[in-house]
Image (cartoon, rainbow, N blue to C red):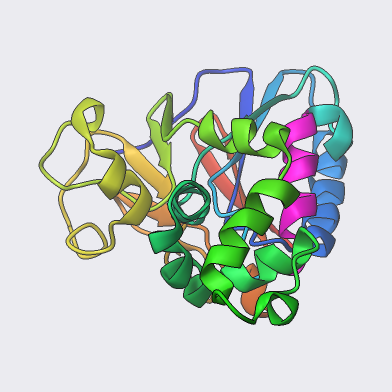
Amino acid sequence: MPRALEPGRRIYAVGDLHGRIDLLDALLQLILADLKDWAGRSQVIFLGDYVDRGAESAAAVERLRQGPDALGLPRACRLLCLRGNHEDLFLRAFEASEYLPIWLANGGDQTCLSYGIDLQELAGEGGVISRLHVALRQAVPSSHRAFLRALPLCYSAGDYFFCHAGIRPGVPLTEQTEEDLLWIREPFLGAAEDHGKLVVHGHTPVHRPEVLSNRICIDTGAVYGGRLTALVLEGETQRFLHT
């Protein structure tokens, strides 16, 4: 069954960024070139995971927080940033120190460095965890925390449903839980049934976009030396831009 957006609308969905500002800038240039002769409505949707593992995580948050102008997008182009599981884990670690070890183990150390926090300097009497919790509260601007907390979990447009990780098969899209939208892999990845809309997601790295009848994965492993990918949707067409 063909999937479509309403006529006169184009969406660019962007996969997991993880602090790769260099790839973000390169992809934005491709999007701008692609928009050059487009007279309809346009929207860029980021699917989450702006922080962790990449050295410019703080800069990624700042650029996205500032909106289309900071990204060099036309003012008429709408911007939507969804929350990923790494934003979720970052916020949990910021609020409660017991989440700090698992956050650090999942790339939070690079986010710390991007905010000017040197973990080696924090080591000493009293332990790094307690010192880090204090340092985070001092280093992360309130504007960044507010931006991350306000990120929506999902978005629907036409025959498409956008989220970070995926959905729980068999559960209506309007009843999906935060946990599944941010963290799920199986049974979502292996599901063959139609979900009502085509799910566009990231979260699970693939070498190239994974296009199935019920979902499209566009996390092409930017932070692992791979590519940053945008899925371009217009009418019944689906195509890709890559760095």
- Kindly identify the residue that appears in the image at 84 percent across and 63 percent down: 22
Q: Nearer the viewer, residue 54 or 155?
A: 54
204 in magenta: no
Image location (x, y in percent) of residue 157:
45, 25
Horizontal and vertical percent position of residue 34: 80, 41
Q: Quadrant of the C terminus?
A: bottom right
As drawn, is 237 to the left or to the right of 210?
Answer: right
Q: How many marks?
A: 0
Q: Main secondary structure of the magenta part?
A: helix
Pick the quarter of the image with the N terminus: top left
Q: Is residue 241 left or right of residue 182?
A: right
Q: Is residue 63 magenta?
A: yes
Residue at 13% in and 37% down:
171
**Is residue 197 found left or right of 190 in the rendered image?**
right
Q: Which residues are magenta?
A: 55-67
Quarter where residue 217 is shown: bottom left
The answer to which quarter of the image holds residue 77 is top right
Considering only vertical position in the picture, is 115 above or below 200?
A: below
Q: Is residue 51 above or below residue 35?
A: below
Q: From the viewer's perspective, is residue 225 above or below residue 3? A: below
